[in-house]
């Protein structure tokens, strides 16, 4: 996208010369003849840089700088001051008010273009630093795993990164969708520009709209200055829309326009803002079912679903668990100042056989807790909170739980029978103790047992009617 420069000068000849020079150098120009018109153009056109004469009608250049600080942060808009007088005092005052640099008239063409280029580069660098300094961290350094399923997804992601096509990341919560989004951005030609992360479920519809598109001054109570949205701040880079399946339908319609035309309007504004961004979206929902249910726009789904990558759950890539566990161990041990912490063989065995319903995020949390709580550097199974009983309850479907493939109501009935039977067995057939274990009233448990026993498929030892505690 071409940078837009606002030229503020009441001398028509100087304006004409500057317009010709800047347009020939690939910039878009906007003109203001006095200080008040300059402020109006700043709000209406949102220029990337201002060339500001100090000697202006209505409002002086210094007054414009002071008013500008009330409209938007000075650091968000570089201002190059022009003065015919070469006055050191005026230049110093302008710099104190936030001007990036000053030039004396008559302007040297080559020097002017160099100063403009450096000012725009600094502005771009500041935008990158604002988002990447806190974002780029060792935890996002690598996609860990050598299992065939992971390598297949990684190779597809690397191919996708070479294009600007939208990417849709699917998978259960905690499978690493944000890590893949960051990796795709780093592998792409946009890697030098910002990656902006937006969680679509963390904010209300109104706040999310403002987060995405920004707002104009006066758009709502308290909007005392213009604010850019994250889509605009990501210009030239990548936007990661996490939990896209939870976005409201009205916002989906506005996002669709961004995907189609790469333009939008700020909240409370009428001017179109153009952006050059790449969209990566992620969800743990079935968007096709959401489309059928009228909860997600079909046209937006097809716009997002250009390249789809499905991330496998951790239970389907068990061979990667030791490497992941070691990575998290080293990181958390370093943070806890326990560099010699290790996982025992028994701990690794327990981690490998656990089904991980919370996926990689759960593994990260388990290791973090173990590092903090373990009394010795050798972390044993009791410190990673994966007791055999817990692991059994969470174990993934297999030959022992065939009812998981049944229709919903049949599966729920069978699961209820399984839980009750297990509680009675662990209570040595004592129904009262089984009710206590299940946190149920004994009479309610007896009623559940009778209901199950009366069904054709119902069969289990219903225990004794003892009232012993």
Image (cartoon, helix red, strand yellow):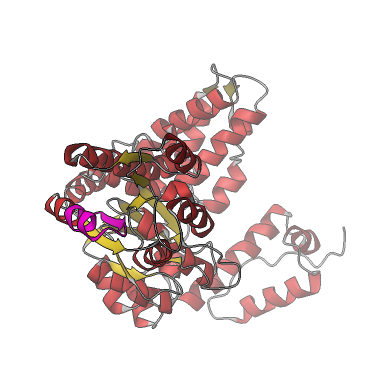
| Image quadrant in which you'd find residue 295 | bottom left
Evaluate whether residue 176 shows in this view: no
Q: Nearer the viewer, residue 460 or 212?
A: 212
Q: Residue furthest left?
A: 24
Q: Where does the C terminus fall, quadrant-wise?
A: bottom right
Q: Nearer the viewer, residue 379 or 327?
A: 327
| Image quadrant in which you'd find residue 412 | bottom right
Q: Where does the N terminus fall, quadrant-wise?
A: bottom left
Evaluate whether residue 39 shows in this view: yes
* Above or below, comparing residue 256 to residue 338 in the picture: below
**Image coordinates for residue 39, horizontal then vertical, percent:** 42, 63
Q: Nearer the viewer, residue 270 or 153?
A: 270
* Above or below, comparing residue 388 to residue 48 in the picture: above
Q: Which residues are magenta?
A: 1-18
* Above or below, comparing residue 438 to residue 123 in the picture: below
Q: Is residue 4 magenta?
A: yes
| 461 displayed left or right of 312 | right
Q: Is residue 152 magenta?
A: no
| 29 displayed left or right of 239 | left
Q: Residue furthest top?
A: 340
**Image coordinates for residue 240, horizontal then vertical, percent:** 36, 55
| 9 displayed left or right of 71 | left
**Image coordinates for residue 228, horizontal then vertical, percent:** 43, 59
* Above or below, comparing residue 363 to residue 178 in the picture: above
Residue at 45% over, 41% down? 90
**Image coordinates for residue 416, horizontal then vertical, percent:** 60, 68
């Amino acid at each position: 996208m071409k940078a837009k420069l606002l030229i503020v000068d009441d001398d028509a000849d100087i304006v004409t010369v500057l317009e010709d020079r800047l347009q020939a150098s690939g910039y878009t120009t906007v003109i203001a003849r006095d200080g008040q018109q300059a402020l109006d153009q700043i709000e209406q056109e949102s220029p990337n840089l201002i060339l500001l004469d100090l000697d202006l009608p209505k409002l002086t250049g210094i007054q414009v700088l002071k008013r500008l600080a009330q409209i938007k942060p000075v650091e968000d808009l570089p201002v190059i001051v022009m003065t015919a007088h070469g006055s050191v005092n005026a230049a110093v005052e302008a710099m104190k008010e936030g001007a990036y640099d000053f030039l004396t008239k008559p302007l040297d063409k080559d020097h002017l273009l160099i100063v403009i280029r450096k000012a725009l580069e600094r502005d771009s660098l500041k935008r990158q630093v604002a988002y990447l300094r806190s974002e780029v961290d060792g935890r996002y350094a690598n996609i860990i795993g050598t299992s065939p399923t992971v390598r297949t997804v990684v190779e597809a992601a690397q191919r996708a990164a070479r294009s600007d096509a939208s990417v849709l990341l699917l998978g259960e919560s905690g499978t690493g969708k944000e890590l893949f989004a960051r990796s795709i951005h780093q592998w792409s030609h946009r890697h030098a520009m910002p990656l902006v992360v937006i969680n679509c479920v963390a904010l209300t519809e109104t706040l999310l709209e403002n987060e995405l598109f920004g707002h104009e001054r006066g758009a709502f109570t308290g909007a005392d200055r213009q604010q850019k949205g994250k889509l605009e701040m990501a210009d030239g880079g990548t936007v990661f829309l996490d939990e896209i399946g939870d976005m409201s339908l009205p916002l989906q319609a506005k996002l669709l326009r961004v995907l189609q035309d790469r333009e939008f309007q700020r909240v409370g504004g009428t001017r179109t803002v153009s952006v050059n961004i790449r969209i990566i979206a992620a969800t743990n929902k079935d968007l096709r079912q959401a489309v059928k249910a009228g909860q997600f726009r079909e046209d937006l789904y097809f716009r997002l679903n250009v390249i789809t990558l499905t991330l496998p759950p951790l239970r389907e890539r068990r061979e990667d668990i030791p490497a992941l566990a070691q990575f998290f161990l080293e990181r958390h041990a370093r943070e806890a100042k326990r560099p010699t912490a290790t996982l025992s063989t028994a701990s690794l065995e327990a981690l490998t056989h656990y089904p991980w319903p919370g996926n990689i995020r759960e593994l990260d949390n388990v290791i973090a807790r173990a590092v903090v709580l373990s009394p010795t550097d050798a972390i044993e199974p009791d410190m990673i909170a994966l007791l055999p009983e817990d692991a059994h309850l969470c174990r993934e479907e297999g030959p022992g739980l065939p009812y998981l493939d049944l229709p919903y109501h049949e599966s729920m009935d069978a699961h209820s029978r399984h839980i009750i039977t297990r509680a009675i067995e662990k209570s040595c057939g004592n129904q009262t103790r089984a009710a206590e274990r299940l946190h149920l009233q004994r009479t309610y448990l007896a009623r559940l047992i009778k209901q199950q026993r009366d069904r054709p498929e119902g069969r289990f030892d219903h225990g004794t009617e003892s009232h012993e505690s």
